[in-house]
């Protein structure tokens, strides 16, 4: 991510495409926000005896997490800072 500092917004768009969201940085520039959801393997459901002669079932669980990459672009279109959340 650090390698993007000093490059232009146009270069970022060319490599990553348009961001999912754009907001103001409070200094006349923009924050370009790229967000995605990473889906991991599903945990299967299980069937078990509940101890009272019955059977219980747990539903499968989808394992996923969100990640966000933010690029701060000054009014001249130059990336000057970045942040990320998630893996």
Image (cartoon, rainbow, N blue to C red):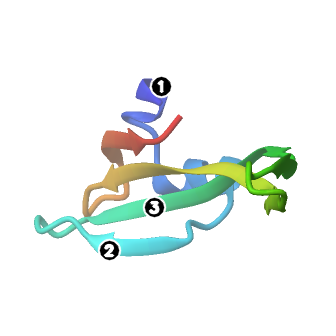
Q: Give the residue displayed 83% in from the left and 49% down from the top.
A: 49
Residue 19 placement, left or right of 30: right
Describe the element under mark 1 as helix, strand or loop: helix
* 84, above or below 64, in the image: above
Disc 3/disc 2 C-alpha distance (Å): 8 Å
- In the image, residue 80 lies at what x, y percent? 28, 41
Q: Earlier in the sequence, mark 1 or mark 3?
A: 1
Q: Nearer the viewer, mark 1 or mark 2?
A: 2
* 1, above or below 24, in the image: above
- Residue 19 occupies quadrant: bottom right
Q: Give the residue displayed 34% in from the left and 41% down from the top.
A: 82
The front one of 48 and 73 is 48
The dot on residue 33 is 3
Residue pushed farthest left?
27
- In the image, residue 71 lies at what x, y percent? 39, 50
The front one of 15 and 68 is 68
Disc 1/disc 3 C-alpha distance (Å): 17 Å
- In the image, residue 69 lies at what x, y percent? 47, 48
Describe the element under mark 3 as helix, strand or loop: strand
Residue 30 placement, left or right of 86: left
Q: Nearer the viewer, mark 1 or mark 3?
A: 3
Residue 41 placement, left or right of 21: right
Q: Determine whether label 3 and label 2 are within 8 Å by CB.
A: yes
- Mark 2: few/some/many CA within 10 Å (<14, 14-19, 20+): few
**Which residue does the numbered mark 1 point to in the structure image?**
3
- In the image, residue 53 lies at what x, y percent? 84, 57
The dot on residue 23 is 2
């Amino acid at each position: 991510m650090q390698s993007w500092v000093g490059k232009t917004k146009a270069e970022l768009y060319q490599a990553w495409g348009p961001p999912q969201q754009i907001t103001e940085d409070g200094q006349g520039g923009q924050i370009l926000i790229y967000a995605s959801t990473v889906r991991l393997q599903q945990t299967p459901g299980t069937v078990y005896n509940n101890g009272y002669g019955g059977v219980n079932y747990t539903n499968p669980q989808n394992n996923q997490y969100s990640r966000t990459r933010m690029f701060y672009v000054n009014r001249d279109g130059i990336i000057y800072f970045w942040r990320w959340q998630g893996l």
